[in-house]
Amino acid sequence: MDHRHLALLWELSERGTVTAVARATHRTPSAVSQQLRTAQREFGVPLVEPDGRGLRLTEAGQVLAAGGRELARVTERIQAAWDGFLGQPTGRVTVAALPSAASVLLPGVLDELSAGAIELQCADVDVAESAYAELVGDHDIVIAHSLTRRAPAGTEGLVSIRLAREPLDIALDVDHPLARRTELTPDLLADQEWVGVPIGFPFDTVRLAVEAANGAEVRVVQRIRDNLLVEALIEGTERVAVLPRFTCPHSPQVVLRPLRVVDAARYIFAILRPDRAERLAVRTVLDSLQHHASRLTQGLPGSRP
């Protein structure tokens, strides 16, 4: 039984298409297809079957893909034990992170790990909540957010660790008439112009909650993903927006006010594939992320860059 065939079947079960597997494993689609045919000859049963224009695993293929997943976990567990024996975690750890969370977590993590043998490679990603789970195939740790206490959709079968709960506040220019209040209610926001986020992004649920409380739609004039750009678009205006409390604002001209009645918060998660969660280097980075997230939520010195 060739363990490479098990790994290939698992990759196909995770990524869904031969093209995606080829891209992730730095092979051509024809090479992946050839290896699938070789695997089928080895096991003597069909492992994949046509599914539209693509392929899907047969029941036999699913059994072997599960074996590939378990084999990967065992391999990483052995590597972790060996790293522990040597006394030092080593290797590259890739992190894909939501930019606003990354801006306050990763500087401290990079500084903490700078004296060790771990190479931390970071990427910033800002996608809809349901798309974060897709990133774990290409990154060791994905830092995502959810508007519920549960991990983002699609993370079933993955390792999900909650790093922090971050309140979501209403952001206003410091001279906005509502900025004089210590807290806001949905009725005060009914007639305001909003700078929102794309539909499907977590912060949009706050806008929906305000509309539900008021029984009427608010006026969204822009839909923007980047928090810095959101700040720029409300600065010097009477527009309002939703921004996270710990990681924004960056401009002294923008203030945050809590929203009463509506329970507005996001939950920041680290999500990983189970096999990669076994690696000592990955666990070391994860421990550092948890440490700096706790400092952030407690408002401790050094918790923001």
Image (cartoon, rainbow, N blue to C red):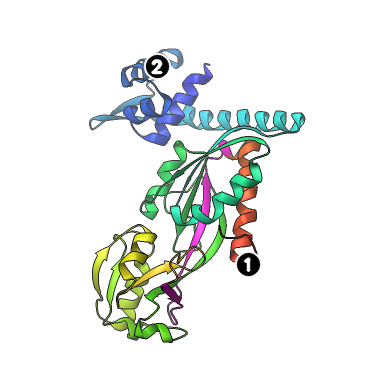
In terms of sequence position, does the residue under pointer 2 or pointer 1 come before the other? 2
* Residue 52, x across and y down, in percent: 23, 32
The residue depicted at 62 percent of the width and 46 percent of the height is 111
Numbered badge on residue 248: none
Where 25 falls versus 222 (above or below)?
above
Image depth: mark 2 or mark 1 in front? 1
Local SS, label 2: helix
Where 190 falls versus 82 (above or below)?
below
Residue 255 shown in magenta: yes
The residue depicted at 32 percent of the width and 81 percent of the height is 189
Q: Nearer the viewer, residue 210 or 303?
A: 303
Q: Nearer the viewer, residue 128 or 77?
A: 128
* For the residues bearing labels 2 and 1, Cβ distance under 8 angstroms: no
Q: Nearer the viewer, residue 157 or 259?
A: 259
Magenta residues (range)? 253-276
Q: Quadrant of the C terminus?
A: bottom right
* Res. 190 visible in picture: yes
* Res. 60 visible in picture: no
Where 115 falls versus 263 (above or below)?
above
Which of the 4 quarters of the picture holds residue 35? top left
* Residue 4, x across and y down, in percent: 50, 20
Q: Is residue 105 left or right of residue 229?
A: right
Residue 69 shown in magenta: no
Where 300 falls versus 45 (above or below)?
below
In the picture of the structure, the residue carrying the numbered disc 2 is 35
Q: Amino acid at mark 2?
A: Gln
Numbered badge on residue 298: 1
